[in-house]
Image (tube, helix red, strand yellow):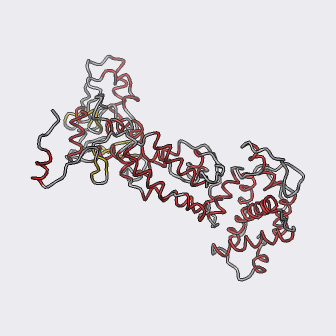
């Protein structure tokens, strides 16, 4: 049993070699357990190769972020489209990405400044837009459920239907067999999530269930008429089965009682204007996209919409302003108040004397350093004076950023205006690090000039309100 005599001789006659399972066919593992971590070895290897630690020293945080986001495009996504990612593999891939982003490795450890779940959020919800691999994997697998509803008379669908049984025209039954059904069984468990956004375009009514499917006025009849549904002869009957030619003939298991006729009359009035198109087939639609077609990107965005941990995040003030990617990522970290000031170092068990390096009058925190320090306040006051403003500094960095960028200014300096908080944050952070690590301090007038020059360089590099000279630029900073 399970043994072939003269195997080598037969292989020679056929002109082929003897192999064994699991094997690789068309780039995919054949004959391996779908939950096996071994089949993900190539994906892990590609992650490690693309995000090699030696690349960290040549890239800023913005550059590393770009590379992390590009890795998903360079790995074989058909792995993620066919197999659910095992938990251990997911942890390993996330660890590779986390360490690469925050520049931590075995030789030189650096702190992970913001929690990973926040990093994985879309940019408009306060994250860096890095893909959540587990969620992306589910969205790719749900593509098979969509294909099952759309494709007719194809071999793969016939095989799956025969093996698992048919629950309705649009999906198979959930198999309870212990062996050989793992991948599709896992995919079918996503049906409830996938079908939340389904609706139908009625054709001949042969496949859409009269009571249980959403086909009329974006509602389900079993919910609108529960008493009638309880009387239905076949709760899974289709629309066409409840028609007799051009009239409605709803099937009930007994005659109606007098008090039940009111609901039946309401139902028939609702159905009165509806007619079948016998020349067309029923169509399954996915309600998130305008054309009713399922896309992985739309499913991912929709799933993320229900997982926001940050409300009213000012994402446009970060990602829509034309700044170097390194500065954008730094401002994003500052808005989370996660820069490694002494209070954050203390939270990480670093025992140090907490004092602001700039004013030496208060404990150092992100809010103090970027908003309330007397040295920082003089930079803010410089711009207040240039624009003729009077402003009370808000309590948090996020509030300050939002308040500043909400000022109505002339369109000619609008983009420059939005860059000013970033210029102050970056100049103060560099000065803080000079005093902390090099023991050097910059005179206040030089610090102000450095801040203005920084802003000037960003304006010219971004081709926004570009000016010929620094003096012209400073002269243009007038609030209209």
Query: Depth check: 230 or 347 in front?
Result: 347
Q: Position of residue 448 (x, y in %)?
A: 82, 69
Number of residue marks = 0
**Residue 159 position by quadrant:** top left
Q: Residue at x 38, y 35 (%)?
A: 189
Query: Depth check: 281 or 431 in front?
Result: 431
Q: Residue at x 72, y 74 (%)?
A: 456
Please indicate whether residue 254 sits to the left or right of residue 62 in the image: left
- As drawn, 378 above or below 397: below
Please indicate whether residue 202 sits to the left or right of residue 371 in the image: left
- As drawn, 428 above or below 25: below
From this viewpoint, which residue is outermost toward the left? 13
- As drawn, 258 above or below 80: above
Q: Position of residue 350 (x, y in %)?
A: 75, 45
Q: Position of residue 473 (x, y in %)?
A: 75, 77
From this viewpoint, which residue is outermost toward the bottom? 468
Query: Depth check: 264 or 170 in front?
Result: 170
From this viewpoint, which residue is outermost toward the right? 361
| Image quadrant where one finds the N terminus | top left
Please indicate whether residue 142 sits to the left or right of residue 370 in the image: left
Q: Position of residue 290 (x, y in %)?
A: 41, 53
| Image quadrant where one finds the C terminus | bottom right
């Amino acid at each position: 049993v399970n043994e072939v005599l003269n195997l080598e001789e037969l292989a020679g006659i056929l002109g082929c070699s003897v192999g064994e399972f699991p094997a690789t066919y068309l780039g995919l593992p054949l004959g391996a357990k779908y939950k096996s971590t071994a089949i993900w070895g190539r994906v892990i290897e590609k992650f490690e190769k693309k995000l090699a630690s030696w690349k960290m020293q040549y890239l800023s945080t913005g550059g590393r972020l770009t590379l992390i986001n590009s890795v998903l495009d360079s790995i074989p996504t058909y792995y993620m489209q066919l197999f659910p990612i095992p938990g251990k593999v997911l942890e390993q891939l996330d660890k590779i990405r986390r360490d690469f982003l925050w520049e931590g490795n075995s030789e030189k450890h650096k702190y992970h400044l913001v929690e990973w779940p926040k990093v994985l959020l879309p940019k408009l919800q306060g994250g860096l837009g890095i893909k959540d691999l587990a969620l992306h994997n589910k969205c790719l697998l749900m593509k098979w459920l969509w294909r099952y509803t759309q494709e007719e008379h194809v071999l793969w669908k016939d095989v799956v239907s025969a093996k698992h049984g048919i629950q309705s025209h649009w999906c198979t039954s959930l198999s309870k067999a212990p062996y050989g059904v793992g991948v599709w069984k896992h995919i079918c468990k996503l049906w409830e999530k996938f079908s939340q956004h389904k609706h139908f375009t009625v054709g001949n009514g042969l496949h859409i269930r009269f009571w249980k499917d959403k086909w009329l006025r974006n509602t389900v009849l079993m919910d609108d008429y529960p008493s009638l549904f309880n009387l239905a002869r076949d709760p899974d009957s289709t629309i066409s089965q409840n028609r007799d030619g051009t009239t409605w003939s709803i099937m009930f298991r007994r005659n109606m009682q007098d008090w039940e006729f009111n609901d039946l009359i309401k139902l028939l009035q609702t159905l009165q204007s509806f007619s079948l198109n016998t020349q067309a087939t029923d169509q399954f639609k996915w309600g998130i996209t305008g054309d009713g077609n399922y896309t992985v990107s739309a499913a991912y965005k929709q799933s993320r919409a229900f997982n926001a941990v940050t409300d009213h995040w000012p994402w446009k003030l970060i990602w829509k302003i034309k700044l170097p990617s390194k500065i954008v990522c730094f401002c994003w970290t500052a808005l989370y108040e996660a820069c490694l000031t002494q209070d954050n170092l203390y939270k990480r068990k670093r025992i140090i004397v907490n004092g602001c390096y700039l004013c030496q009058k208060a404990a150092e925190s992100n809010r103090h350093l970027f908003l309330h320090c007397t040295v920082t306040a003089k930079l803010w006051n410089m711009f207040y004076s240039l624009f003729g403003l009077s402003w009370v500094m808000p309590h948090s960095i996020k509030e300050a950023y939002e308040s500043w960028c909400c000022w109505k200014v002339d369109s000619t300096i609008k983009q420059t205006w939005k860059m000013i908080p970033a210029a102050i944050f970056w100049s103060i952070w560099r000065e803080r690090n000079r005093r902390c690590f090099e023991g050097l301090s910059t005179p206040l007038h030089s610090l102000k000039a450095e801040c203005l020059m920084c802003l000037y360089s960003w304006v010219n590099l971004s081709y926004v309100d570009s000016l010929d000279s620094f003096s012209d630029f400073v002269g243009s900073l007038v609030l209209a």
